[in-house]
Image (cartoon, helix red, strand yellow):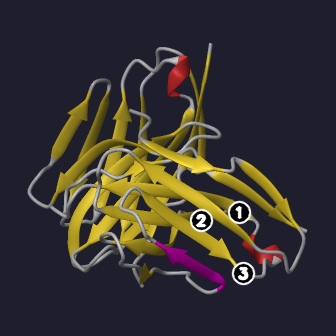
Amino acid sequence: NAGVTQTPKFRVLKTGQSMTLLCAQDMNHEYMYWYRQDPGMGLRLIHYSVGEGTTAKGEVPDGYNVSRLKKQNFLLGLESAAPSQTSVYFCASSDRDTRQETQYFGPGTRLLVL
Amino acid sequence: KNQVEQSPQSLIILEGKNCTLQCNYTVSPFSNLRWYKQDTGRGPVSLTIMTFSENTKSNGRYTATLDADTKQSSLHITASQLSDSASYICVVRDNYGQNFVFGPGTRLSVLP
């Protein structure tokens, strides 16, 4: 039982390049989330999904796209990376929404955009 | 605007000592408050989740308190260990959708 895994762990991009971050969970969770964490700030929600085939915007969605084609996977895409997207990206998952369900986080992906 | 503030920003204590971390929030309407521990280079891990009606909740040496009237919470760590060195994040969930408001965290260093 690996929990939530993220690939890659670290990536360096040049401005304008594209990439996809992969999140996978093996807990059969319905809900999945993408957050970014910047120094001195709390985690901010980029996009989330409440089930396979569904996605929704969070607090800071601009410049990102997501897809949830399979229940266990949640992909975050950057079509044209910008230096402002340098951050640590965390994926999380949780079971059905009971208001008190625990969010399980992955280990993070460090992204540097030059 | 929904906000979560935490204090202190950082804290250094000696192993075996107790400490208390503070969280103030303006999130409304309130659903629940969570404390997470985040080790360096790792994702956050849930410690406690408290609803409006819960004043205190413990998880081993971690005890969280909640005062929903003053919109304050605290996390008390008893008999600190070196492994407690981490960032502690307060998160408040509102009653709308998937809105979790994360605080900036308190960085705790436990020294031998």
Q: Are marks 1 and 2 in contact (CB under 8 Å)?
A: yes
Q: Residue at x 90, y 70 (%)?
A: A14
Front position in the image: B81 or B8: B81
* Distance CA(mark 3)–CA(mark 2): 16 Å
Q: Amino acid at mark 3?
A: Glu
Q: Which residues are magenta?
A: A63-67
Front position in the image: A91 or A22: A22
Among the two numbered marks 3 and 1 on one chain, the one whose residue lies closer to the N terminus: 3
Quarter of the figure with residue A113: bottom right
Quarter of the figure with residue B71: bottom left
Drawn side of residue B47 relative to residue A98, left or right: right
Most distant residue in the left direction: B53
Q: Residues within 10 Å of mark 1 (few under 14, many from 20)?
A: some
Residue A35, position in %: x, y?
A: 53, 65
Tell me the residue that label 3 is attached to: A79
Number of labels in the image equals 3
Tell me the residue that label 1 is attached to: A87
In the rendered view, tell whether residue B46 sits above or below residue A16.
above
Tell me the residue that label 2 is attached to: A36
Q: Are marks 3 and 2 in contact (CB under 8 Å)?
A: no
Residue B69, position in %: x, y?
A: 18, 66
Instruction: Determine if marks 3 and 2 fall on one subunit.
Output: yes
* Distance CA(mark 3)–CA(mark 1): 16 Å
Instruction: Determine if marks 1 and 2 fall on one subunit.
Output: yes
Front position in the image: A50 or B59: A50
Q: Which type of secondary structure does the marked residue at label 2 adopt?
A: strand
Q: Which type of secondary structure does the marked residue at label 3 adopt?
A: loop
In the rendered view, tell whether residue A19 sits above or below residue B85.
below
Q: Which type of secondary structure does the marked residue at label 1 adopt?
A: strand
Q: Amino acid at mark 1?
A: Ser
